[in-house]
Image (spheres, helix red, strand yellow):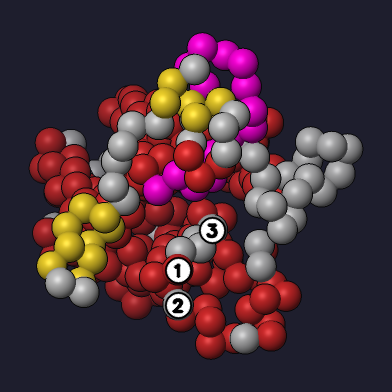
Amino acid sequence: MIAFPAIDPIAIQIGPIAVRWYGLAYVAGIGIGWWYLNRAARQERLSWNQEQIGDLVFYAAVGAVLGGRIGYALFYNLASYASNPLHVFAVWEGGMSFHGGVLGFILALWLYARRAQFLFFALCDFVVRAVPIGLLLGRVANFVNQELWGAPTTLPWGVVFPLAGGEARHPSQLYEAFLEGAVLFLILRAVALRGAAIGTLSAVFLIGYGSFRFLVEFVREPDAHIGYLAWGWLTMGQVLSLPMIFCGLAIAIFASRRPSPEGV
């Protein structure tokens, strides 16, 4: 087993102001994603200009953050937030749902597509290729925060998280960083470089993330106040991932009947 490295979740503190690694991960994910999309647009000779990309990143980031927070309240802690609705604004206490973030992301891009008169799926295909960057950084930040840890394990790479007791546990945050971050990024990049029909990248992202998340949930400790939903293994994360997979498959079938895009 491996002892958890002594990493302070606070990156910088000046007086009462504390900047946490988790917050920096969000900022870095947005910034690097913005840079990556600009680079991809230049290298692949896509029709997106810098102003449009900036608008896309802004809409996507706001939608994802708001959706993530509201999704957490609805999916994981509804009773608590129903009794104190204003507590949803206490973002400094943590609590984000990626599945809620996806819904907010989709809604924000749909609104932008309507305002700017773009094809919705062409727009999603372009932006979604940068999402794994934020996922990788966010999951590493989860590890640093000692949250969302895995189930107990006897495997040699099990990590002893001080906040989780003395048992060695799966570093499920790092599993997700690798699969949902690095691996999914490379898959999306490969598909994008090959050229694909409109909607294909969106479908690959939904299927890829949903599948990776579903699998990792088998070794991830469920939220204590929720536990397993059924059969001693089904988690809320798995329940929320299944619709992503099914929607991705439906979009993939739809995309396969469309021609490949040129310059989008």
What predominant SS class does the magenta segment belong to? loop
Whether tag 2 and tag 1 are in contact, CB under 8 A, the answer is: yes
The residue pinned by badge 1 equals 93
> Is residue 102 in sight in this rendering?
yes
* Residue sitting at x 78%, y 45%: 228
- Specify the label residue 97 is tagged with: 3
Q: Secondary structure at mark 3?
A: loop
Question: Residue 84 is drawn in which quadrant?
Answer: bottom right
Residue projecting furthest to the front: 166
Q: Secondary structure at mark 1?
A: helix
In the image, what residue type sits under mark 3? Ser
The residue pinned by badge 2 equals 90
- Specify the label residue 65 is tagged with: none
Which residues are the magenta region?
145-158
Mark sitting earlier along the chain (2/3): 2
* Residue sitting at x 20%, y 72%: 17
Question: Residue 234 is drawn in which quadrant?
Answer: top right
Query: What distance separates the C-alpha of mark 1 from that of mark 3?
Result: 14 Å
* Residue sitting at x 67%, y 45%: 222
